[in-house]
Image (cartoon, grey):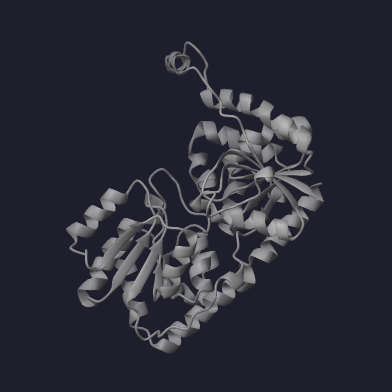
């Protein structure tokens, strides 16, 4: 069967999970065609060029846009540049759909689902929309976007979410429960070789995530500074890039942690896996950002557990669903640096038997509930049920 996969970009480092899903669908003989605004990260994420359709860039007169936006602000003209762009984009998407004749369209992220909804309806092709995080929690705080999401809820044939918490959240926003399916973004377990570690010596921590507020890096560094006072040999490596880079570098300097905390910036996925494999423990201090943005379930927690790392993290969004209940002693309240520090100390002071038990539970959790093959098979069956 042919499926049109629609995403704004294909495939940035922060969206490894979409690339993984597409490749696994290919393996089980789903005929994927990608429609996107832009191809990025081609070297690390190669894909057949003849299966990627790049939408033409929409050109607008910038002076006209500024003028109409100004008139709109003073209520003299009703102007929505975003929807005007979608009207233009819809024509391109309709042409693609008619040419490719997919049995199903799969839009990745709620806002992307809104962008292709009209085209899918005009061509009478079932639309699946996958929500992942900000598109559910942050966009729904904006009245205009909430109205758009209601159209997605109404017009989509099915909606997938990555956690029970997100499912409940969308139901409360008005989405029909019958349309909602929990399909995790998983990992191919054979790509993550379990590594035996000397759990009696936990010194080197790693954290991975974009340098944005919801990832909680400031809380992580603050907590780490408290732990370092009692354990001066601790190190923390942070992988990722983003708008808080300079803020975090200053924080490290102000706390005199230059010898303990390193910010590596963005690196390739293969290099990231190497750092994960070499670390003693993983830490991620996610929290709700001031603008409402929050996680779905960070895939890096799946990777870290699959590789055999104990994980310090927070009771945030769907995170507790990916961490075995018996390992919740390593979770803290989000935004609480003192409690995060106490979890770090609890881990490094745990006996090796307790830590080994925790990492085995973590890996088994990924194998049982976040296995890429299993989750993608659920997606394939959903495609078939709608086609």
Residue 66's place in the image compared with 29, above or below, is above
Q: Measuring 62% from the left and 68% from the top, which residue is drawn there?
A: 369
- Tell me the quarter of the picture where residue 343 sits: bottom left
**Quick check: 365 left or right of 344?**
right
Residue 374's place in the image compared with 158, above or below, is below
- Tell me the quarter of the picture where residue 350 sits: bottom left
Q: Position of residue 165 (x, y in %)?
A: 56, 56
| Residue lying farthest to the top in this orientation | 76
Q: Measuring 30% from the left and 56% from the top, which residue is drawn there?
A: 218
Q: Position of residue 232 (x, y in %)?
A: 22, 75
Q: Measuring 76% from the left and 54% from the top, which residue is drawn there?
A: 30
Q: Position of residue 42 (x, y in %)?
A: 54, 49
Residue 133's place in the image compared with 87, above or below, is below
Whether residue 151 is visible here, answered yes or no, is no
Whether residue 190 is visible here, answered yes or no, is yes
The total number of labels drawn is 0
Q: Position of residue 33 (x, y in %)?
A: 70, 45
**Quick check: 302 left or right of 246?**
right
Q: Measuring 21% from the left and 64% from the top, which residue is drawn there?
A: 257
Which of the pair 335/208 is nearer the observer?
A: 208
């Amino acid at each position: 069967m042919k499926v049109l996969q629609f995403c704004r970009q294909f495939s940035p480092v922060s969206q490894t999970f979409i690339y993984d899903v597409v490749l696994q669908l290919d393996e089980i003989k789903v005929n994927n065609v990608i429609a996107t605004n832009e191809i990025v990260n081609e070297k690390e994420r190669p894909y057949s060029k003849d299966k990627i359709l790049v939408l033409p860039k929409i050109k607008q007169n910038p002076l006209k846009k500024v003028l109409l936006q100004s008139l709109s602000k003073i209520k003299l003209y009703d102007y929505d540049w975003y929807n005007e762009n979608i009207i233009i984009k819809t024509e391109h998407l309709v042409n693609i759909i008619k040419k490719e004749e997919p049995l199903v369209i799969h839009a990745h992220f709620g806002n992307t689902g809104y962008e292709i909804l009209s085209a899918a309806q005009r061509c009478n092709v079932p639309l699946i929309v996958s929500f992942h995080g900000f598109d559910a929690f942050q966009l729904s705080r904006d009245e205009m976007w909430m109205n758009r999401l209601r159209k997605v809820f109404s017009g989509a044939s099915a909606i997938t979410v990555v956690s029970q918490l997100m499912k409940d959240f969308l139901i409360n926003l008005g989405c029909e429960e019958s349309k909602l399916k929990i399909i995790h973004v998983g990992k191919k377990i054979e790509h993550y070789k379990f590594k035996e570690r000397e759990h009696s010596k936990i010194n080197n921590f790693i954290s991975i995530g974009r340098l944005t507020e919801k990832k909680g890096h400031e809380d992580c560094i603050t907590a780490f500074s408290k732990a370092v006072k009692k354990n001066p040999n601790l190190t923390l490596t942070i992988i990722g890039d983003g708008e808080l880079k300079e803020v975090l570098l200053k924080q490290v300097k102000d706390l005199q942690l230059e010898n303990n905390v390193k910010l590596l910036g963005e690196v390739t996925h293969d290099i990231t896996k190497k750092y994960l494999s070499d670390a003693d423990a993983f830490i991620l201090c996610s929290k709700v950002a001031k603008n409402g943005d929050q996680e779905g379930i960070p895939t890096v927690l799946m990777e870290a557990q699959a590789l055999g790392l104990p994980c310090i993290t927070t009771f945030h969004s769907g995170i507790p669903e990916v961490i075995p209940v018996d390992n919740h002693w390593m979770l803290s309240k989000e935004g609480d640096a003192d409690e995060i520090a106490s979890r770090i100390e609890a881990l490094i002071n745990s006996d090796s038997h307790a830590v080994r038990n925790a990492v085995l539970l973590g890996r088994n959790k990924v194998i049982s509930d976040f296995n890429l093959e299993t989750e993608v098979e659920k997606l394939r069956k959903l495609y078939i049920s709608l086609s």
